Image (cartoon, rainbow, N blue to C red):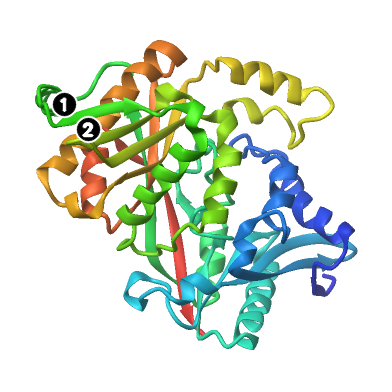
Amino acid sequence: MSEITIRPVLTKADRKAFVDLPFRLYAHNPNWVPPLKDEVHGLITPGKNPWFEHGEAEFFLAERGGQIVGRISAHIDHLALKQPPEQGMGPGCGNWGMFEAEDAAVAAALIARAEDALRAKGMTRSMGPISLAMWDEPGLLVEGFDHPPVVMMGFNSSAYAPWVEAAGYAGVQDLLTYDLPIDKGLPELSDRIVAMGERSDKIRIRRVDKSRFDEEAALLLSILNDAWSDNWGFVPFTDAEIAYAGKKLKPIVYEDLIRVAEVDGEPVAFMMTIPDLNEKLKDFGGSLFPFNWAKLLWWLRKPQVTTMRVPLMGVVKKLQSTRMASQLALMLVEYIRRDSVSKFGAVRGDFGWVLASNGPMKSVGEAVGGTVNKVYRIYEKTL
């Protein structure tokens, strides 16, 4: 077999090869959803992705016999380096991600090259896959290969976990997604808790106001930064990232699907739900051209979907571990559930990801009738 060469991504052609590789590797896998190539290019390009304002990354391609057979990133998030080590990241923790490999030999060569790049930057721990941030597509899929992922969640070959473990990595954290039926209502106990909250004069559940989109987006992400600040792997959103996320999400934001919970007039919790865009993107082949952009715009006017995804949810830290937090979470779920079914035709929800170490949020997933349908694993190794 030909020798494997690992080389850095330097040219426009290299970037194209980096983005295009999964389209060959998963061409015949019915559960892989082709990402929009322009979105992937934006993710890995400084000046387009504000992550690069506090992070640095190297990208590598594996080549064998004149063919690209693998890819990987090696990157450092300087905000993550400032986090407490007990929260997972912290000083000396570098990351790798964007990982794809044709076989075990390619995987070993790529991971070794990423480790060398992290050592050269003074890193003492290697953690991955994280592509590029915890807010993007973290974790390696290790359970749930029999159905496609929802929008903004990754998919990979079932062969990858053994290859990563063979390189000396051990799992450090699992990320769970929950599948839940939403067309039949909540379980009886949860329904009673919601009804009690509806009788309270202190609690108000409101829709977001899209006419004040920037202000509302900043509010939601400020709650998120507070709510998640003690979570494993947490890295705060910067102002630039808040603006960037808002711009990307605005076309798929619907007032009925994002709710804010207020207690005595103070915003203290929120839940964001989006239609599963993957149901539409799976037939686009990674491109909006020449006519897919028109199909997508038409669909976005009033999408009808099978699945809704809950990518973000948070309750401010001062209320966490209280009965009020659980009640607000269930009320947010129920209010959005009603509109998801009646206005968008959805019959199921996908809730997550949820940290395996986050007991309260796992309890919410179970309380609304959810069952774990995918597990993503983050691995760690001492360099």
Q: Position of residue 272 (x, y in %)?
A: 41, 35
Residue denoted by label 2: 330
Disc 1 designates what residue?
194
Name the residue: 56% across, 47% down.
Answer: 243
Q: Which percent across, then down, holds residue 155?
A: 56, 47
39 up-or-down from 213: above or below: below
Counting from the top left corner in percent of width and height, residue 306 is at 47, 20
Which residue lies at the image location 47% right of the left edge and 71% below the top edge?
Answer: 80
Secondary structure of residue under mark 2:
helix
Kindly identify the amino acid type of the residue bearing the numbered disc 1: Val
Residue 217 lies left or right of residue 200; in this view the side is right
- Label 1 secondary element: helix
Is residue 181 something that shows in the picture?
no
Query: Looking at the image, can residue 314 be seen?
Result: yes
Q: Quadrant of residue 46?
A: bottom right
* Residue type at the position of mark 2: Leu
How far apart are the alpha carbons under marks 2 and 1? 6 Å
The label on residue 125 is: none
- How many numbered marks does the figure carry? 2
